[in-house]
Structure formats: structure tokens, C-alpha cells
Amino acid sequence: MSIIEVKNLTFSYEKNKKIIDNLNLSIEKGSYVVILGHNGSGKSTLAKLIVGLLEAQKGEIYIEGTKLSIDSIDDLRQRIGIVFQNPDSQFVGITVKDDIAFGLENRNVPYEQMKEKVLEVAKLVGMENHLEKNPEELSGGEKQRVALAGVLVYDPEIVILDEATSMLDPKGVFEVNQAIQQFKHKKTIIAITHNLEEALYADRVIVLNQGKVVLDDIPKRAFKEEEILKAANLDILESMKLIDLVKEDQDLSNKKEIEEILWELTFKM
């Protein structure tokens, strides 16, 4: 069952320069989808269109069968949470606990219920021991996990991560992706990124190039399409580069077996 349907979507910031070009796609409920693309591919613009921060110039977006429009936007936004690349821009509380609770306070959730829910999502993202800290004391990865908790706390059906790890070091990226695994298949997750490594454990990979879908498949098949990935200005995985070196070595015996082992290791956690 599709939770998001995008039909003939077109959007431009400038006249005669389409960022999203007659795009069609559907996303299944409960799936973990990674949308890959280089700067200017349209991936972040697509996220903003889905959440209603931008208005399409042509085409339609449906959330659980309801068309996104001026009349439906307030209701549909209650079902979608979005985490942006800079967590500092999303902080509103003095402490981590206050920040996570902000969305519930706006919904007039009773204090005791709010307290339980804040602790529940803090545990989910591994931040239960930091609730009394000021967000400024946290590392980049910790800040982004708090931002994620602030979205999860009001229980949206869809969670969009718009370049949520692009400003983080490798440790921070690992922390955030580990947190995402905790609610995989419990929510519909759409991760927007240019980093192939973040797509390794997705159910589906969609590659955008110049506002169009150029690749749509499971990671194991999608990542074998090196020419399409390179044409989209995406940096292939280190293991893929190693496989390419193995292929080029004319003197290496058992090349095929080595390639297969490296490929399988790529997808092991």
C-alpha cells in the first residue's frame, strides 16, 4: 500500500530551469527509502514539496490518498516529521528534555503523558542520559539524535531526513543511522542524502539526476549500476572501488570469487 504518491511533479526556482522535471514515484507504507542525488539533483526540493514547504507548479502529491493542497496541508503535516541538516536550527528548548517535549506542549499533551513519551523516544535514539543537558553541550551526532527524537515524539507516520547527516563526522553519521534502525519498518522513512553508505540497509534506493528518477531498485542491484551512479555525480562505495581494482588486475587468480566476497561483505552490518 502506497503512503505517498507523486504524480507528474514539476518545480522550478527559475524560469526554464526545472529542478523537479515531471517526476513520478510512489513510496510504500512502512518502507525505508533512500533518495540519492548530488547537489542540484532535486532531492531536497522533493522533500520540501512532500512536506508542503514548497508548492508544486505542476503535478500532484497524495499522502495516504489525500491530495496535498491548501485545504489539506495542516492535517497532512501532522502526519509527517522532517529533520534538516543543521540540528541547531531546530532547537528551541533550554535542555534536551525541553526540546524533545516542545512538539507535545504545542499539542497540549498532559504533563505525565508527555514525560513518559519524552523518556520513551530519548531511549529509542540513545539520549536518555542527556535529558538535563543544554543542547549546546552535545556533539553533532547527539544534537541530530535529539532533533530526531523531537520529531518522533509526536508519532508521525512519515519521517523525512533531509541531509540529516551531511554536517556530521563519521562517528555522528554512525550514531544517527543506528538510531534510524530502531524504528525501521515502524515508520515510513525517507532519507535524503548523497552518501551511498547510508543507503546500504534501505529497502529501496531512488537516484535523482536533474530532477528525474534515473534509478529505482533495492541497494544490491542499484549499486551495481556504476555508470548511472557516476553520471549522477555520486561517489561509489569504497568496496566498489576495490572490486573495480580487482577486475582490472589481469594477473589475479580467483577474481570472480573475490569480487563476490567483497560485494557480500558490503551489505553485512
Image (cartoon, grey):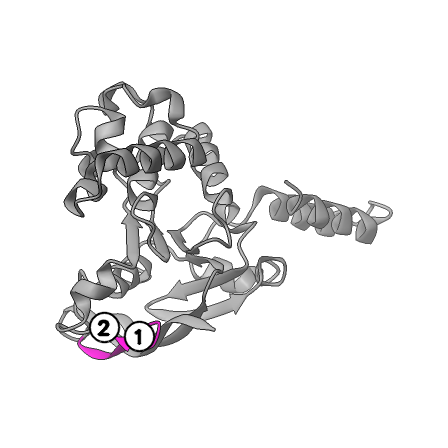
The relative height of residue 89 versus residue 6 in the rendered view (above or below) is above
Point out the stretch of residues depicted in magenta: 57-67
Report x, y in % for residue 77: 23, 60
Q: Amino acid at mark 1?
A: Tyr
In which image quadrant can residue 137 be found? top left
Q: Amino acid at mark 2?
A: Leu
State the residue at coordinates (50%, 42%): 182
The magenta stretch spans residue 174: no
Q: Secondary structure at mark 1?
A: strand
Q: Using the image, tell me which numbered label, if any, was put on residue 68.
A: 2
Report x, y in % for residue 12: 19, 70
Report x, y in % for residue 252: 82, 45
Q: Using the image, tell me which numbered label, if any, was put on residue 62.
A: 1
Q: Are marks 2 and 1 in contact (CB under 8 Å)?
A: yes
70 vs 75, left or right, is left
Q: Farthest residue toward the right?
A: 253
